[in-house]
Amino acid sequence: MTQQTRADGRTPDQLRPVRITRGWLDSAEGSVLVEFGGTRVLCAASFTSGVPRWRKGSGEGWVTAEYAMLPRATNSRSDRESVRGKIGGRTHEISRLIGRSLRAVIDVAALGENTIVLDCDVLQADGGTRTAAITGAYVALADAVAWGQAQGHVKPGTVLRDSVAAVSVGIVDGVPLLDLPYVEDVRAETDMNVVVTGSGEFVEVQGTAEGVPFRRDELNGLLDLALAGTAELTSLQAEALAAPAAGFRA
Amino acid sequence: MTQQTRADGRTPDQLRPVRITRGWLDSAEGSVLVEFGGTRVLCAASFTSGVPRWRKGSGEGWVTAEYAMLPRATNSRSDRESVRGKIGGRTHEISRLIGRSLRAVIDVAALGENTIVLDCDVLQADGGTRTAAITGAYVALADAVAWGQAQGHVKPGTVLRDSVAAVSVGIVDGVPLLDLPYVEDVRAETDMNVVVTGSGEFVEVQGTAEGVPFRRDELNGLLDLALAGTAELTSLQAEALAAPAAGFRA
Amino acid sequence: MTQQTRADGRTPDQLRPVRITRGWLDSAEGSVLVEFGGTRVLCAASFTSGVPRWRKGSGEGWVTAEYAMLPRATNSRSDRESVRGKIGGRTHEISRLIGRSLRAVIDVAALGENTIVLDCDVLQADGGTRTAAITGAYVALADAVAWGQAQGHVKPGTVLRDSVAAVSVGIVDGVPLLDLPYVEDVRAETDMNVVVTGSGEFVEVQGTAEGVPFRRDELNGLLDLALAGTAELTSLQAEALAAPAAGFRA
Amino acid sequence: MTQQTRADGRTPDQLRPVRITRGWLDSAEGSVLVEFGGTRVLCAASFTSGVPRWRKGSGEGWVTAEYAMLPRATNSRSDRESVRGKIGGRTHEISRLIGRSLRAVIDVAALGENTIVLDCDVLQADGGTRTAAITGAYVALADAVAWGQAQGHVKPGTVLRDSVAAVSVGIVDGVPLLDLPYVEDVRAETDMNVVVTGSGEFVEVQGTAEGVPFRRDELNGLLDLALAGTAELTSLQAEALAAPAAGFRA
Amino acid sequence: MTQQTRADGRTPDQLRPVRITRGWLDSAEGSVLVEFGGTRVLCAASFTSGVPRWRKGSGEGWVTAEYAMLPRATNSRSDRESVRGKIGGRTHEISRLIGRSLRAVIDVAALGENTIVLDCDVLQADGGTRTAAITGAYVALADAVAWGQAQGHVKPGTVLRDSVAAVSVGIVDGVPLLDLPYVEDVRAETDMNVVVTGSGEFVEVQGTAEGVPFRRDELNGLLDLALAGTAELTSLQAEALAAPAAGFRA
Amino acid sequence: MTQQTRADGRTPDQLRPVRITRGWLDSAEGSVLVEFGGTRVLCAASFTSGVPRWRKGSGEGWVTAEYAMLPRATNSRSDRESVRGKIGGRTHEISRLIGRSLRAVIDVAALGENTIVLDCDVLQADGGTRTAAITGAYVALADAVAWGQAQGHVKPGTVLRDSVAAVSVGIVDGVPLLDLPYVEDVRAETDMNVVVTGSGEFVEVQGTAEGVPFRRDELNGLLDLALAGTAELTSLQAEALAAPAAGFRA
């Protein structure tokens, strides 16, 4: 593979500029504006005491997520799902992915019978919205858990067993690339979203041949890129959580 | 009326800090983040050539609007309308109000057979979301019209006959107040939304007795406040349009 | 303003023939067929003991309304909202308006934990359907309250603090007119619906510039007309309630 | 069978008082308020040139029907189907039955490529709403066909090959009864709706054992009653069509 | 009537080959694949303890049914009702018919507070799907009742007062025919579905004139055919229930 | 890894008994009943000339899929999606996966402007329904393509560039297992669905940590199992297509 430069000047194994702004909303128990280049996702964590009926009395909490895009997040306007009266398959799929990813790192027994809902709304989409959403939602979740502990709703101790981050990788013109913006994404032969814990283990691996099927060595090359990328995102999450929340005017 | 101070330190006839940030999205033909204090509404204008079928061949354009709130825009989370599968009455009502307000100042014949859709999504709600939306949407509309003219889709000349802005007024503890935040709004006996053109004429007057009916002199007092407030908003709109678009990092 | 005659021979400040027929249905706790000229609305009040869950234990009752039009109430047939599977914005808006108007005059504590639902179904529409509905619904509500008291569900005493009536006003060819039928309504530059209590105070003022914005003196002229019109409707409501219910064969 | 008297004083083979009021709406091409005792159904026929897409170019017209009940047509209020967002099975079933019954007597070739929609809205329900609807809808249909011929949309000549009427019959306490009101209907062991042409042939026979199955001789007894009842309805339809339309104030 | 032969070689009064295969599913409390010629319906009975809320405390059970067709059950593919987001009138109508037919023979008091849902899914449709569904559903219901008794959820004793079966009859080219396949069904002038108990009494008689109305003697001829056909189906049901369940590999 | 035996007696790398029955429906252009042990999926391919509007004039065809489960396919009954009025996220997700998998091997240019819809309806579910559906749908697709060529709708030549099959793998008690039935699936720590072409390249890799995250070596072990399993399925598909269609009575 030649170390060619991409349209935005990055090397194949380079992330776009990533920003994680905590405290973007005034009243949510956790809120993050996460940016992967031009992709901007607002992740809001809502903490409520109690759990859905089917989980009552279990002593365990519940974490779920809903993903959506504003109609003009994309280059051309899309109809609202509320106006169409139904949620599309892609939206469902991504909401479920985010929820599973967060549940992989939370200790629901330690959370106790509390519910945290993560709303991930894409304000602007430039590829990688689901991976940005997972990466930002983890930080909002951490803030909501801390809020629950500060308020006494959750017992002190470790509730999040690990952090979790996600990145997209893909093969464009035969070259494996990290963190694809929209212009690369539409040209990718293979597209993969990888969700990885802070300790480097897989939570989800979703690879799709958009055009031609992919070989096992290509799969391996993509996983290498993804693991390096998520390790970097893990550091950025930790930094964001270590600093004071910047808030909306950041 | 005694010139008492409000919880946020304002006088009864004072607006909250208002910010109008143009160019908040990279690809929309017009986009504005409008803030009335803690209320933040993202207004995106989408320009498309052509009109809905029922208007084809008329030589006239069409302007419409859709209003929505993110689930955690408010203090406690609301269910998504897309998940519930239907749009609530309040959402419908406000979308229609925004659309009517903008159509009152646009010359649809001068626009030609083009459509502009205004998406007003409330990112954070602290009272007055519909009036902020109208005020911001007008600016996004002006940018979209200019874009259409720059691209040659719309003929040169005046398309917007006037500007339009809106503000809420209400009576709290017997005192008429301008631009109510949430804490005042829930306590208001009478609540009024007033939409006014740049030249000071009414487009909409919507007054509602929440608790006790209101007298004609009270109505007059509220209209005085509203006309002063919208005159100020008209100036802020003009300033925003005169300056270069600040963009997302403003 | 010259005292010109309208298409139906009325003067600008004259109501259409108004008829309020009580007891139009055999089993509803209150029912009124209200006619404003060719506009006919059937208002049925359904009394049930108990309140919605969110109000239980408050000691207070609840009054709500639903408005709808039969498909052939209008000149050309409209699709049923039940067939389309969703309720339109206009329907939502009017249902909410009727409910708010009635709640402005009812003492929910005196009503006790009982619910009254007002169904306002437009059998024939010739302009002013929402104002006719409010005017008729008040009478049906009064009958349902009386029924509740006669049955011992509601304690004796004053439950309705005042009556409420509504009328439309508008400017056609520069002339302010009272109680617009369809042919005038479609030509109105400004259209206003005004809801007024029996003692002459405002419950709702909803003015909309359909074509050109309106000046403050025009607003004042319209309010003058509306207050005179609702005073007359208040008398007609009182007369109807004083006489025995006429029933369907009236 | 003893010739016992029913709660409302009728003999087993007697219809309730039937009234067919033509011209109840001002603008519909045909409109009838039909009453079978306390059951009141408003039947509006809407004539439009042209046919649904799947029938274009066939040279044939189309007749269809929609049935619905106002929420307070019944003793206790039912939720609106528009609010629930879907149409119930019973509504679907009856709409289809009315449409099929009318199509059995209309010559669609003679109608030409025109569509007539029959809206049958139950204003008050006291048993037999579907049979009243069919009986009234036929008269409204006849008026709409005449309107189409008078306007020149339909060629002169016979479009309706026959008339059609319907009645309910049922077995209560072992006694076959004609035209059941609600109090009898809920107690019927067997319930049958029979649709018959003016010349006495069957269009629909729908018999249902509500409690215990019924024998063939019972079926025959019910059919005897139904044929006598529909013969009487046929006369009343003819009388109504022979007289001038009475209109709303009848 | 000449004793002519039909396209598939049957005489007018002959059923198609009927197969009733019990135990087609591994885990349902009752399951039957029923075939009427090329028509194949999978009937699954689901037994659950408890009843819907409105029936609680009555001591009585509940039986209901849902009918549906796979999209490619028919010659050309139909859209899924789940994708269209609503259930069609025909589906509603048949689901209700199956439920009523089964409830006519079950002793709900003997069933106790238990619910049995019959799912009748048409895998392949060649006419008579609703009659095949009723005939098969009865057998699945009998198995589910037996399961409930074997498990001790239902007391020993007679729960099914009788069996129930159904068949279609119709007049094609003036000839009354039993058990119509699709090719005959589309040509039938009159179409009738008849539901009959094991002891030969009627549960439902639904006759429809598709083209021309039918005379009373024709009705009688069709009922003769239907009673002979259902008697035969009653025997086949009894045989199926007497033999061991054949299971999926039958 | 010890070569332990599973509950159903299989070794970890052994498929369940697989049966592919072609021609299960009489009229579909391709139809397959595919069984993976107790999992039974009916795959029907519907061929229609023409393509959706957005693809017209492209010269290319379209292949899409819809997946659904009968309500009693599972151990306990699930509500119908048609009754709930909306399609769940899981259904959407699987429908999209099947469609993508088939499109990966079809040459849409060679198909020409024709559409093939694959309906995959789960008659009985015992784990692996989506992988069985893909494996069976490929065979039904091949039959529908052949039908299109035989009818002259599709030009002779290669339309399917390769075959495609799918299998599930997972880690249960630390042991990687092939083709999980329901009892293993619910206990799996990691669950992966792998879609592979006949030539052994990947179309989709979807791995999910249900409980604890998984390491890269575990991922590799699962991929080894999956490639062996899909190679075997590829042979079974080829065998099925080489033999004459067995039909429903197989």
Image (spheres, coloured by chain):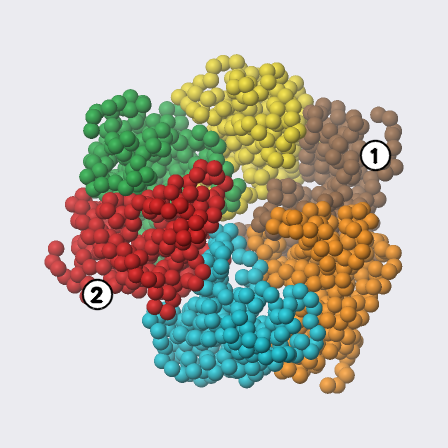
Chain colours: A yellow, B green, C red, D cyan, E orange, F brown
Which chain is indicated by disc 1?
F
Query: Which label is found at residue F13?
Result: 1
* Residue sitting at x 84%, y 44%: F17
Q: Nearer the viewer, residue E67 or D124?
A: D124
Q: Quadrant of the C terminus of chain E?
A: bottom right
Which percent across, then down, holds residue E73?
A: 69, 59
* Residue sitting at x 23%, y 36%: B222
* Residue sitting at x 69%, y 78%: D217
B96 sits to left or right of E12:
left
Secondary structure beneath label 1: loop
Q: CA distance from mark 1 to mark 2?
A: 88 Å
| Residue under pointer 2 | C7
Is the Cβ of the residue at disc 1 closer than 8 Å to that at disc 2?
Answer: no
Image height of B101 relative to D94, above or below? above
Q: Amino acid at mark 1?
A: Asp
Which percent across, then down, holds residue A245?
A: 47, 17
Which percent across, then down, holds residue E6?
A: 75, 77
Q: Amino acid at mark 2?
A: Ala
Picture quarter containing residue F3? top right
Q: Nearer the viewer, residue E185 or E22?
A: E22
F210 sits to left or right of B220:
right
Which percent across, then down, holds residue D117?
A: 46, 68
